[in-house]
Amino acid sequence: MTEILLFAVPGLPLLLAIALAFAPFRQLVHATVWLAPLPALAAALLVIEPRTFEEPWLLLGARIGVDELRRAFLFFASVLWLLATVSAMRLLRNDDDRTGFFACFLFAMGGNLGLLVAYDVFSFYTLFALMSFAAYGLVVHGRSAESYYAGKVYIAFVVLGELALFAGLASAAWSAQSTLLADLRAAPLPEGATTLLVVGFAVKLGIVPLHLWLPLAHAAAPVPASAVLSGSMIKAGLFGIVLVLPLGVTALPNHGTALAAAGLVSIFLAALIGVTQQNPKAVLAYSSVSQMGLIALALGVVLLAPDTWPLMAPALFFFAAHHAVAKSTLFLGVGVFNAEPRPTRRRAVLLGLLIPAAALAALPLTSGHLAKEALKDGLAMAFGPTHWLILLVLAGTTATTVLMARFLVVLARRPAGDACPGLATPWAASIAIGALLILLWPFELPPAKPLAEISLLPALLPVGIGLVVSLLAALALRLAGLRVEPVRPGEVLALFPSDNRPGLLLPPLPRPDIRLRRHLATLRRPDALSARAESWAVGGAVAVAIVVVMALLEAPRFDDLFRSQVSHSPPGLADSLDEGSAVVPNDHVR
């Protein structure tokens, strides 16, 4: 039974996506799409003991399983996908292109949830790539010039990241003489392979300078897609780094320094650019870059000082869950606010958004405060309690407060759109989950001080400074009659053309053939867009079928070459990646 449940984690979303290719099943899928993330949630809550299963016929020998680490990521990822799915069902119920959206949405969901239960390189990379490429359809769903530009930038970074990740995993598997992810982590990897892996996962994590796709994609995608892009999918970068890098085992000073430096730059550069944005979703996107910078900083510190891993591990995993729920709530709240025509209820939505905003700003007694305090304790353990890095983390909290204030201000200025009944229900549920996350988190929490020992004034100081800075900056600009021009999302990409006009650094692009232009003009017609959206589902189903058939034909040929004789697997949350923990194949409990 457990084996069926684990294979259903990616299997059910992919099956529903393929069913959309057939007209008789579309209405049924549209009505039951909310079932897709339930196997992942059930696996996170019900499969308590670590289990692994092997299917030699699938791909090149797939191995899936669940342990404490994977359960933690499955828990918050499945919850976010469930809330976003319900929101998408209500927001897009009258959208002519909803079939194409849900096809891409389900493929991305299957890849995202499936990679969390993958134990081997082939399954992990296949599902990681499926998630990344399927999300392109979510980014360009709006069919506007901005959506297509964001899609071009997004797919360029996806290709870059997937090439680096594939090369890194292949090199690491060859060096480790194994295709199990745990064996890659335990083996001494070449410097080049480690660098490629860091780059591949950093693209998904969205840290500077590999972040340029993230503000564009989040601003262009529909609200439910933005919620999972920022809340769940970018955490795949963190999950991958935890799985394959020797965190807590071996020091990698070069990569640790690079990650920590990129994290510090991300924290403050993203905040500086984010406060200039006029689109509330763009502000939230730059906030995600800033928060992922804090994760990159913590990972860099662990690579520099492996002894900090037992303290950092639960803090990192809880911080990922906290950020996922809070950011998803904020994105879903944008959709609720835009769809609410009555001023009284719009003010109520703004008040509700204060809860996740306060958590991101690490207000005392919130999940964000607990997570950031634990990360600060890890930094203090590595460098001492008065190190300048801790002061920078506190300054980062101030920057996050300013970003949240900016988000609420620009959102309050947005005009009301068309009413959408029922859209507030998943948003209200996400608020409740975020507010009670410390109580609902069924895994190891970061070590925390007793409430009696928490000094409220020092804890409130970074948030208070952020609010004062926001107020003073707004007053100064108003009194001086100045206006801050927004930095275009993507920053340096503004130097390049977004259409056939020449950019500052590129020569004029050649004019397309007249037949190609006529074909593109035809595709821009609304009726053609609807047909093309449905063809995406057919194309996706055919592509999946081809991949499965090829895998079945090639599996016997490569089986002897790639299957490993020795395997290891992570057993727990804080110490789940200790070297030497064994995996028992099939359905035996370790």
Image: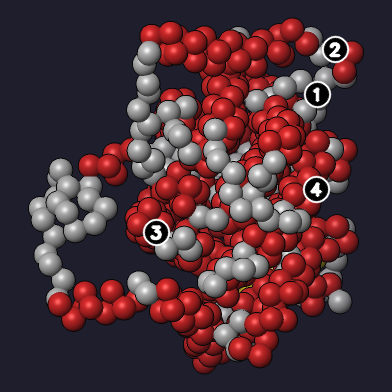
> Which one is in front, 571 or 409?
409
Disc number for residue 144: 3
For residue 545, above or below residue 265: below
Q: Which residue is mark 1?
A: 365
Quadrant location, the C terminus: bottom right
Give the x, y percent position of residue 259.
Answer: 47, 36
Q: Amino acid at mark 2?
A: Glu
Farthest front residue in view: 342
Task: Determine the secondary structure under disc 3.
Answer: loop
Neighbor class of circle 1 (other Cα within 10 Å; few <14, some 14-19, many 20+) is: some
Q: Quadrant of residue 325?
A: top right
Disc number for residue 429: 4
Disc 4 vs disc 1: which is toward the camera? 4
Q: Residue at x 55, y 22 (%)?
A: 402
Disc 3 vs disc 2: which is toward the camera? 3
For residue 340, above or below residue 158: above
Circle nearer the N terminus (3, 1):
3
Q: Is residue 278 left or right of residue 545?
A: left
Task: Determine the secondary structure under disc 1.
Answer: loop
For residue 355, above or below residue 508: above
Give the x, y percent position of residue 201.
Answer: 49, 51
For residue 537, above or below residue 205: below
Q: Amino acid at mark 4?
A: Ala
Neighbor class of circle 2 (other Cα within 10 Å; few <14, some 14-19, many 20+) is: few
Q: Which residue is mark 2?
A: 453
